[in-house]
Image (cartoon, helix red, strand yellow):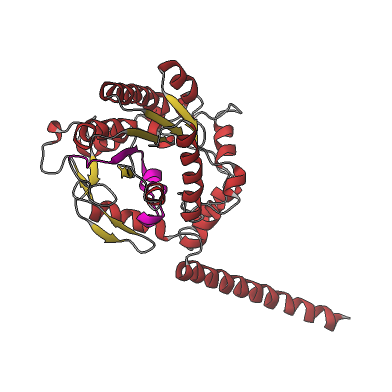
Amino acid sequence: MTTKSNKRRRRWPLAVVAALLGTTLALGLAEVMLRVFDPIGLCYQEEFNRYINQAVQFAWEGRAPTESDFDGHLLRMKPGIDLDLGSFRVRANQLGLRGPEIATPKPAGTFRVLLLGDSVVFGWGVDDEHTFARRLESEWNAAAPRTRLEVVNTGHPLFDTVQQAATLREFLPKLQPDLVLLVYVVNDVEPSRDVAEELLLQKKPDPAESIVLPHDFWSFTGELVQPVLPAIGQFVSAQTNLERRVARRLDGQTYAPEKFGKGPRGWPRSQQALREIRDLCAAAKVPFLLFDHSLPAIESLPPFCAAEGIALVPLRFSKEDHALGICNSVLDSHANAKGNELLLQRLRAALVERQLLPH
C-alpha cells in the first residue's frame, strides 16, 4: 500500500510538469498559427500605420503650428499614390481621392454623386472595385444608360463631420455634383482636430474625456497575456463586451456616444458642420441625403436632422447582419466585400425610392 502511494506521489509532479509543457507548447503553436495565417486580422494595425506614414499628406506639413487651420482640411491622400498594403491596394487620383481621375468641368451627360464620410466610405480593407461607391457607379453604367453615373469618393480614415464639411467646401464648386451623400458614423463625434492640436500645440487631453473602462474577464486576460503572447492577447481581448463595460462605467445608464467621452464636445461641432453641409448644398441647389451608419447609435442624430430639415436614412448593420460575416476580420470591423454589397443594396434602394438618381 505504501509503495503504491509513493508511486502516486512521484507521478503527480511529473503529470503537472507534462501538463504545463503541453499547455506551453499548445499556446506557442497557437501564437505562431495566429501570426502566420492571421485569421483574426493582426495585419490591420500594421497596414493602417503604413497607410498613414506613406500615403497621407498632412495640411500642417511645412507650416508653423500657429498657421494651421484646425477646422480646415487636415489630411488627405497624396495625389497619384499607388500603395499595396498587403490585404488590399490603395490608389489615389490627382485630387488625392480614392478612385479614377475626375474630369473638370463635369462632362455633359454625367450625373455626379459626391460621397462624404470616413473609412467606411473610403472602403478600408477592400480594393476599390469592391467598395459600395465604385460598385454603385459601375453597375449603373454597365447598362449603358443615357446618363452616365459618376461617384466621387471623398471618404478618408479619421474624418469627422468637420472634415467632411471642409471637403465639401473645397470640392463642391470645383466638381459640380448633382447629389451629395454623407455616411454618418460614430467617428463623426470624435473631433479630428484634437489629434492635430495635441500633436502641434502640445495641447493636453481633457481629463474628463480620458475614460477608463472597467475590465471584464476577456479584456483583463488579454491585457495580462499580450506582453508574452501578443497575437493570443489580441484575440482574447477582442472577445470583450464593450457595451457591457461602458454600461458598468455609467452605472447602468444607456450608452450614448454623443454624451460620453469626447461626445459632449464633438457632437455640437458635428451639428454645426451638418448645418454647414446642408446650407452649402442648398445654396448650390444640390440634394443632400444623410445615411445613419452610427454604431452604437447616435440617438440624438435623427431628431436633430428632423428639426434641421436634413433628410436621413438608417443604414446601420444589425446583429443579424454581423452574423453573416460582413467584416474584414475579428480585429477590423470595417465592411468586407460582402458588407459593401449589403451597404450598396440599401443605399441604392433608398436613392431609387427617393428618385434621386437620373431617370
Left or right: residue 68 compared with residue 261 = left
| Rendering quarter of residue 290 | top left
Residue name at image x 40 percent, y 25 percent: 267
Residue name at image x 42 percent, y 28 percent: 263
User: Which x, y percent locates residue 260?
Assistant: 46, 28
Most extreme residue toward the top is: 307
| Rendering quarter of residue 155 | top left
Question: Does residue 109 belong to the magenta stretch?
Answer: yes
Left or right: residue 76 compared with residue 113 = left
Image quarter (top left, top right, bottom left or bottom right) of the N terminus: bottom right
From where the camera sits, is residue 203 visible? Answer: no
User: Which x, y percent locates residue 107?
Assistant: 22, 42
- Number of dots carrying numbers: 0
User: Which x, y percent locates residue 16?
Assistant: 67, 72
Left or right: residue 49 compared with residue 69 = right
Most extreme residue toward the front is: 146
From where the camera sits, is residue 22 visible? Answer: yes
Q: Is residue 84 above or below residue 65?
A: below
Residue name at image x 36 percent, y 26 percent: 270
Q: Nearer the viewer, residue 332 or 244?
A: 332
Image quarter (top left, top right, bottom left or bottom right) of the C terminus: top left
User: Which x, y percent locates residue 108?
Assistant: 23, 40
Most extreme residue toward the right is: 1
Please state the extent of the stretch shown in magenta in the rendering.
105-133
Question: Does residue 111 belong to the magenta stretch?
Answer: yes
Q: Is residue 317 above or below residue 284?
A: below
